[in-house]
Image (spheres, rainbow, N blue to C red):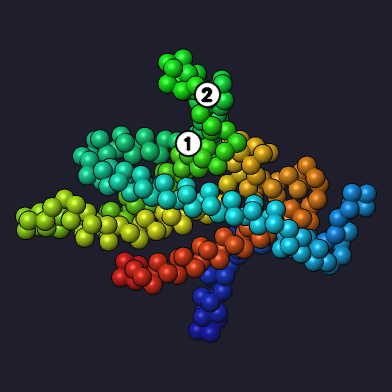
Amino acid sequence: MAATADTRDGRAPWALTAPALMLFVGVLVIPLAMTVMLSFHDWGQYKGIEPVFILKNWREIATDPYYAEMFWRTFRIALLTTLITAMFGAPEAYILNRMSGRWKSFFLLVILGPLLISVVARTLGWALLFGGNNGLVNKLLMSLGLIGSPLPFMFTETGMVIALAHVMMPFMVLSVWTALQRLDPQIENAALSLGAGSFTIIRRIVLPQIMPGVLSGAIIVFSLSASAFATPAIIGGRRLKVAATLAYDEFLNTLDWPLGAAVAVLLLVALVLIVVGSNALIERRYAEVFR
């Protein structure tokens, strides 16, 4: 009887996790495996997809400088977006944490509010503001005589970085704000009573303690920016492609599914390596925080 009870106790966790495991395998693992297999197939304009094992797609990506520039642009835009969100999001989270209860709730709602709106709608808002001669801001500045021609925003990397930074800002703010919950305000008061200036308090007390939150937010923002599709597709269009829009074009415009699958798999592998490596470095550097 005791052995039977032990067997039941051992099977219970597997029985409880089986539905979630099946869903994970069916929704994520199997489609990813099929995408990887598809990247090794051949494709022709007249013959379509041939289920043969070849390395033509991977060889083309490795040897053609067009794809190298595409991935370099993707990670360059993601890195600039991450730096901008960290530069503005960390002070914003610090100010939010120092507010009183009523104002903190209000501004937290303001920060989280954009997450309730579609990314497409938010990006189209930037296009309406700075979209060439018809952009509202450009028309206003030109009517005031402040600029002679529209500000270059659409189909530029600058426009993509600004729009992505606006979309990703809440993730950075929330990550830093979560880290600030560990910070005891009395430590700042003690440093202030001992004669430390505001800059010294921020540099030597606040910043070291919120740095894990900044780095965690940076990982989230970088990975989401590098894999973003809607914002680069609207702002960059077909003139300025990134890896996600390139894979989309290969799948739906060129119909070269194997090449699009290879681009998607390469982007996924690169992001996984970057995220896992960065996370390992963060946990090693700030081991005390994650205990």
Task: Identify the residue at the far right of this view.
Answer: 46
| Residue found at x 41% / y 43% | 170
In the image, 128 versus 142, the foreground residue is 142
Classify the position of the C terminus by image quarter: bottom left
**Residue drawn at the location 51% of the way across and 62% of the way down:** 275
Front of the two marks 1 and 2 = 2
The quadrant where residue 109 appears:
top left
Look at label 2 and name its amino acid.
Ser
Q: Secondary structure under badge 1?
A: helix
Q: Amino acid at mark 1?
A: Leu
Residue drawn at x 34%, y 68% is 286
User: Height in image: 193 above or below 118?
Assistant: below
Q: Which residue is mark 2?
A: 149
Which class describes the residues within 10 Å of circle 1: few (<14), some (14-19), or many (20+)?
few
Question: Is residue 193 shown to the viewer in this render?
Answer: yes
Please indicate, yes or no, whether residue 174 appears anywhere in the rendered image.
Answer: no
Side (left or right) of 243 relative to 175? right
Residue 86 placement (x, y as % from top left): 38, 50
Q: Earlier in the sequence, mark 1 or mark 2?
A: 1
Q: Which mark is residue 169?
A: none
Pinpoint residue 229: horizontal percent, then vertical percent: 61, 44
Vertical order, 200 against 284 (above or below): above
Q: Position of residue 215 (x, y in %)?
A: 39, 58
Vertically, is 169 above or below 191? above
| Residue 116: numbered disc | 1
Horizontal and vertical percent for residue 271? 57, 60
State the CA–CA distance, disc 1 to disc 2. Answer: 35 Å
